[in-house]
Amino acid sequence: MIDSHCHLDHEPLLSDLANVIQRSKEVGIEKLLTISTSFESFSRVKDLINKDEMIYGTIGIHPHESSTDIITSKQIIESLNENSKIIGIGETGLDFYYNNSEKDKQIASFKEHIDASIKTNIPLIVHSRDAEKASGIITFKNSLDLQDTFKSIPMDNILIETDSPFLAPVPKRGKKNEPSFIDFTAAKLAEIKNISKEDLIKKTTDNFNKLFFN
Ligand SMILES: [Zn+2]
């Protein structure tokens, strides 16, 4: 089982890292992909990938940070070349809901990330508000539309993630999320797809490995 999107460099995960890793291993997680959101975040991610062999990272600037942290495609490619455990680009994308960053700066930043992804063939991690991603949100009772969406997505195209420390799944809702809670998301998604949890875990793990280690 793999948590394909978490933010280990955010509190309270960062100061409790040893326990977070321990509990991840206890539920059977093999890899954690910790996602950069800013330059400061990326410097923490570079430390994190050396803390445990299960931890991998990405390089990128979140749309909310894109007016202050200006990144180029060249910088992204350099960071990827310098660190073999930096395996993804993001999280990038557009978010005009909070408008923390000006529209044109978000678009310019997104383009740099896309350019780096095209040039390197390394996966892009895209933030999108109300996105169809299999995070803890699918365990929420009011997420029936999202559950319907997942019924129709082929199993080959699904990864699972927590987006921790944000958005804890039911029954942990309201608590700080952490990678080990991915078990609830896996169970719920298996129920939606009408397959066993074991099959779901095996398939999503294969998907991740094919996408990032191919
Ligand atoms: Zn995220």
Image (spheres, grey):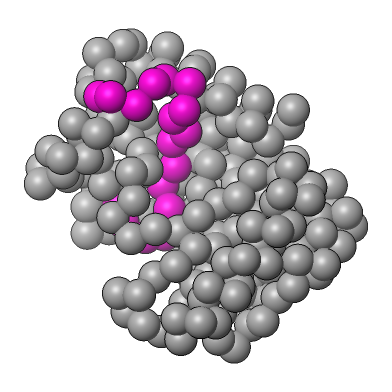
Q: How many numbered discs, if any?
A: 0
Q: What residue span does the magenta drawing correspond to?
A: 151-169
* Residue at (28, 24) in percent of width and height: 152
* Residue at (47, 33) in percent of width and height: 159
Give residue 120's position: percent from left, percent from top.
79, 47
Q: Examine the rendered structure and indicate whether residue 6 appears above or below residue 12.
A: above
* Residue at (37, 43) in percent of width and height: 133
Left or right of 43 on screen, residue 94: left
Left or right of 143 on screen, residue 136: right
User: Where on the picture, by quarter, is residue 113?
Assistant: bottom right
Q: 168 and 69: which one is in front?
A: 69
Q: Is residue 59 visible?
A: yes
Q: 193 and 122: which one is in front?
A: 122
Give residue 50's position: percent from left, percent from top.
78, 53
Give residue 102's position: percent from left, percent from top.
46, 86
Q: Examine the rendered structure and indicate whether residue 193 appears above or below residue 149.
A: above
Outermost residue on the right side: it is: 82
Give residue 205's position: percent from left, percent from top.
55, 25
* Residue at (73, 31) in percent of width and height: 213
Magenta-drawn stretch contains 5: no
**What secondary structure is the magenta-colored segment mainly?**
loop
Indicate the quadrant containing the C terminus: top left, top right, bottom left or bottom right.
Answer: top right
Magenta-drawn stretch contains 158: yes
Q: Is residue 16 visible?
A: no
Q: Examine the rendered structure and indicate whether residue 37 appears above or below residue 16.
A: below
User: Where on the picture, by quarter, is residue 25?
Assistant: top right
Q: 111 and 209: which one is in front?
A: 111
Q: Examine the rendered structure and indicate whether residue 101 appears above or below residue 80.
A: below
